[in-house]
Image (cartoon, rainbow, N blue to C red):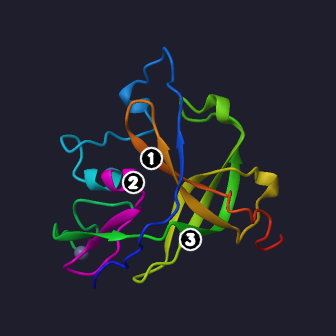
Amino acid sequence: MSPTPTGPVAVFRESLAPRGQIDVPYLLDFYPLQSEEHTRIHPFFKHLREGRFTTTRCKACGELLWQPRAVCSKCLSEDLEWVELPTEGTVYAFTAMVRGPPLGMEADIPFVIALVDLDTQWRPLRLLTRIDGVQAGEMRIGDKVRLKIINLADGRVFYRFTGQAGNAGQGTKR
Ligand SMILES: [Zn+2]
């Protein structure tokens, strides 16, 4: 099965300001090392820079893997392919982080963290992500959120989702 062609899509992006004088110890660094010499899933980060949200799928057993992996967690095959994921998802559950954020995110609290469901052609995929652009009090289960690419000051990238689709509070009322 081949990946669904997604074509060019508008993707939210944000560049974070340099952290300043504090170098985060490696084990406390929220963001993973991303270069080819550090990780076999380096294509994930290359794709993110291109505005693409991808993961690996096992060509031996067909399992869609999340997070992307170098070895299939179901059958241990290393014969994997990169596939495109949707860049829009639906909020399954959420909470707000108000204390004890990861290093470097102290100025951001409170912020929203959510379980987001993505529809893929293989199986539903549920991922944990930070949500920008909306406060917990405005969010509802069922809200649509969109991929947002974060450019870190040191050249790395990461992803969040954003509620900036303008439909905050339009999901299931609880
Ligand atoms: Zn497999």
Visible residue check, residue 74: no
Q: Tell me residue 73's x, y (percent).
A: 28, 67
Asked if the magenta segment contains residue 47, the reply would be yes
Q: Tell me residue 139's x, y (percent).
A: 76, 59
Q: Is residue 104 above or below residue 85?
A: above
Please state which amino acid type lies under the numbered disc 2.
Answer: Leu
- Name the residue at 35% across, 65% down: 55
Residue that badge 2 annotates: 48
- Name the residue at 51% across, 63% down: 127
2 vs 1, front mark: 2
Q: CA distance from mark 2 to mark 1?
A: 7 Å
Q: CA distance from mark 3 to mark 2?
A: 19 Å
Label 2: few (<14), some (14–19) or many (≥20) C-alpha neighbours in 10 Å:
some
Q: Quadrant of residue 41?
A: bottom left
* Contact (Cβ within 8 Å) of mark 3 with mark 1: no
**First reached walking from the N terminus: tag 2 or tag 1:** 2
Residue that badge 1 annotates: 158
Q: Tell me residue 66's x, y (percent).
A: 39, 64
Label 1: few (<14), some (14–19) or many (≥20) C-alpha neighbours in 10 Å:
some
* Contact (Cβ within 8 Å) of mark 2 with mark 1: yes
Q: Nearer the viewer, residue 92 or 120?
A: 120
Exactly how many numbered labels are in the figure?
Answer: 3
Residue that badge 3 annotates: 117
SS class, disc 3: strand
* Contact (Cβ within 8 Å) of mark 3 with mark 2: no
- Name the residue at 70% across, 68% down: 143
3 vs 1, front mark: 1
Q: On the picture, is 143 further left or further right than 146?
A: right
